Amino acid sequence: MSSEGKINILVVGNGGREHALVWKLLQSPKVNHIYVAPGNGGTSNLEKVTNIPIGSTKEDFNKLVEFSVKNSIELVIPGPEQPLVDGISKFFQKVGIPVFGPSELAARMEGSKTFSKDFMKKYNIPTADYQNFTKYEEAYKYIENSKNNLVIKASGIAAGKGVLIPTNKQEAFDAIKEIMVDRAFGSAGDEVVIEEFLEGDELSILCISDGYTILDLPPAQDHKRIGDNDEGLNTGGMGAYAPAPIGTPSLLEKVRKEILQPTIDGMRKEGYPMVGCLFVGLMIDSNNVPKLSID
């Protein structure tokens, strides 16, 4: 900590999310200096901010720790999901530097859709009906016998692009071939989740937790589809706005009671408490009933 009682922060990542985090952190009087690894053009032009030439992959974690110790970093904030899934938190915990982000075990909720869906089922958290598949032939047969509209999802992290929404069976067959055979999303497609298609409005909520209590931020809506009128492929996000009007006080209270708190309580009971920020993607049907979805 500096002589004025201010702290040095390391933000990990190189995207727009990290730029936004840095921009907001700079507004705090408690900040002395922010380093961004590796950062981007936006973060390079900010006062009291320095980009450093270290990446955010697992191979870079030891370098990040070494840099942080040498430069008196007192808080680390990973922006992307992948470093958290890869266990970045434990690298800094070993040297006593706090990380705002979940453990490697807790990050599986983001890193594996099959893991998170099975968790929802175990703790009776409302979500779409689903099946998990590791074999293309079994997934094909399931689609062949299904009478519902379906959503096909690569289980692993695919930068928001691993969700395919077919409009007919042939498109569904093409989707599992793209993921499981053609490997369009790499290892993220080692396993797929096939869900029932949920009709309704999308709602996104970020929830900060210490493993026991929850503090949800204003609800947002993403513009996911690449084309107008909700048409085209899903993307990593074509923009968002908050607060979303659909997130009424009564709906948010229902979400806290039926989804957020049961998730936090369940993760703690399983031995991997959520300490950090939990993202939940919801679908709200015509009866104002929320169900947890996964991107």
Image (cartoon, rainbow, N blue to C red):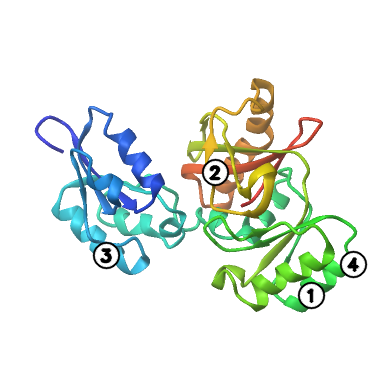
Between the residue at mark 4 and the residue at mark 2, the CA separation in whole angstroms equals 33 Å
Q: Secondary structure at mark 2?
A: strand
Image coordinates of residue 167 in percent, x first then y, are: 80, 57
Which residue carries the number 3 mark?
A: 62
Question: What is the three-letter code of the residue carrying label 2?
Answer: Phe
Q: Residue furthest front?
A: 228
Assess whether mark 2 and mark 3 are in contact (beta carbons under 8 angstroms): no
Which residue does the numbered mark 2 point to in the structure image? 279
Left or right of residue 241: residue 114:
right
Quick one: label 1, few (<14), some, or many (20+) residues within 10 Å?
A: few
Mark 4 or mark 1, which has the lower sequence index?
Answer: 1
Residue drawn where x is 61% and y is 52% of the image = 295
Above or below 139: residue 158? above
Q: CA distance from mark 3 to mark 1?
A: 41 Å
**Mark 2 and mark 1 residues within 8 Å of each other at the beta carbon:** no
Residue 264, position in %: x, y? 57, 41
Q: Which residue is mark 4?
A: 145
Sequence-wise first label, 4 or 3: 3
